[in-house]
Image (tube, rainbow, N blue to C red):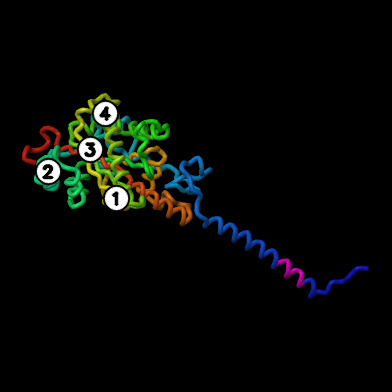
Amino acid sequence: MKVSVRPEQRQARLLSALIATSALLLGVLGALISHAFQSAPECSENSECGRGQCLDGICVMARISPPTATPRCVVGFPCNGEGCERHGEELSCVDGRYRKILGPELCQRESVRSYLADIASRCGNADQCTPTALKDLVISNEEFDRLIQDFGTAFALHFDTGRPRSRDRSGTSPRWNEARNTYIDQLIPLVPTLEGADILLIATASKTTKGSDKNEILAHRRLREVRHLLLEATKRAGGNPDTLRIKDTNLGDLWQRDEDGYKHLSLSRSIFWEPSRERAFTALIDDFDAATKGLNNRAKENQRAWSEQVMNQAVFVIPNPCTVEGAADDDT
């Protein structure tokens, strides 16, 4: 016997089905949203993130594509005709390498003369200047950033969080030895900018590492490592590492840079432990919006946080060309 269904019963069943379906869809959507806003998984290297990228210990599920534009010409790199843009920088090709055009008046500029005179008055001379005195000069001197731009040959070596570790110095870590060779390969073309110049090293640590003492210790390890890297690069380039004149100062987390402040330094290179990290950082600094196009807000925040942290985990290498014989008067 066929049971007839009243119209109002049919409508009630349809309504119940719609409610059940809507509840299921909302549940699925809620799960997706919850998953999207959960903390990103922790990691130590890219291989742990599948198709994502490990940045500052967390997986960011989108890689930054390397810039598609023509690469920028940088000091020390071969000018072999492969093509690069100078971006308004005054570079010339000398002995097969790009060099900053330094006019003869550079070492007579007031900012340069004033800074060198300040070193002389506080330290007696650069070879006797203590790290503490240099620290005061770097932090207190308003002309320091401009001086880096005037010299045009300053560059930075950036380090991963917590690196180098105390045991990395021994050379028993295969992972760190690989990173060390990457640094040296990038430094070899820059060796000519170091020869004959007084070299100032400024080590920094990011404030995200808790504890000022730990930051100072970490920056000190970076100073020791960069000294080793510069000497080894000079040796592999066929130079004499004993001729390098290096002074250093450890600023710990006292000298913090943001994106604009870092750009203002106009460094000739930013060197990283992995080429992919250097490309990612350069893309973020050059054009953050373009580098993070298509990422959600959380991923963008992670990218900015990583770039601002790693830019302050560095040793800045500043060759002073005015100490080259004949480049400046004896009284400077």
Label 4: state its secondary structure: helix
**What is the CA distance from the residue labelled 1 to the residue labelled 2?**
24 Å
Tell me residue 150's x, y (percent). Answer: 19, 44
Name the residue type under label 4.
Thr
**What is the CA distance from the residue labelled 2 to the residue labelled 3?**
29 Å
Tell me residue 263's x, y (percent). Answer: 29, 49
Q: Nearer the viewer, residue 128 or 16?
A: 128
Q: Is residue 195 magenta?
A: no
Q: Nearer the viewer, residue 202 or 60?
A: 202
Q: Nearer the viewer, residue 326 or 136?
A: 136
Q: Residues within 10 Å of mark 2 (few under 14, many from 20)?
A: some
Q: Residues within 10 Å of mark 4 (few under 14, many from 20)?
A: many
Name the residue type under label 2.
Cys
Start and end of the magenta stretch?
11-18
Q: Which mark is residue 85?
A: none
Q: Earlier in the sequence, mark 2 or mark 3?
A: 3
- Nearer to us: label 4 or label 3: 4
Q: Earlier in the sequence, mark 1 or mark 2?
A: 2
What quarter of the picture does the N terminus occupy? Answer: bottom right
Q: Residue at x 10, y 38 (%)?
A: 328
Outermost residue on the left side: it is 331
291 on left or right of 251: right
Q: Residues within 10 Å of mark 3 (few under 14, many from 20)?
A: many
Q: Is residue 7 above or below residue 204?
A: below
> Disc 2 designates what residue?
123
What quarter of the picture does the C terminus occupy? Answer: top left
> Disc 3 designates what residue?
100
Label 1: state its secondary structure: loop
> Disc 1 designates what residue?
253
> Disc 4 designates what residue?
234
Are the two marked residues, 4 and 3, in contact with CB atoms closer than 8 angstroms?
Answer: no
233 on left or right of 116: right
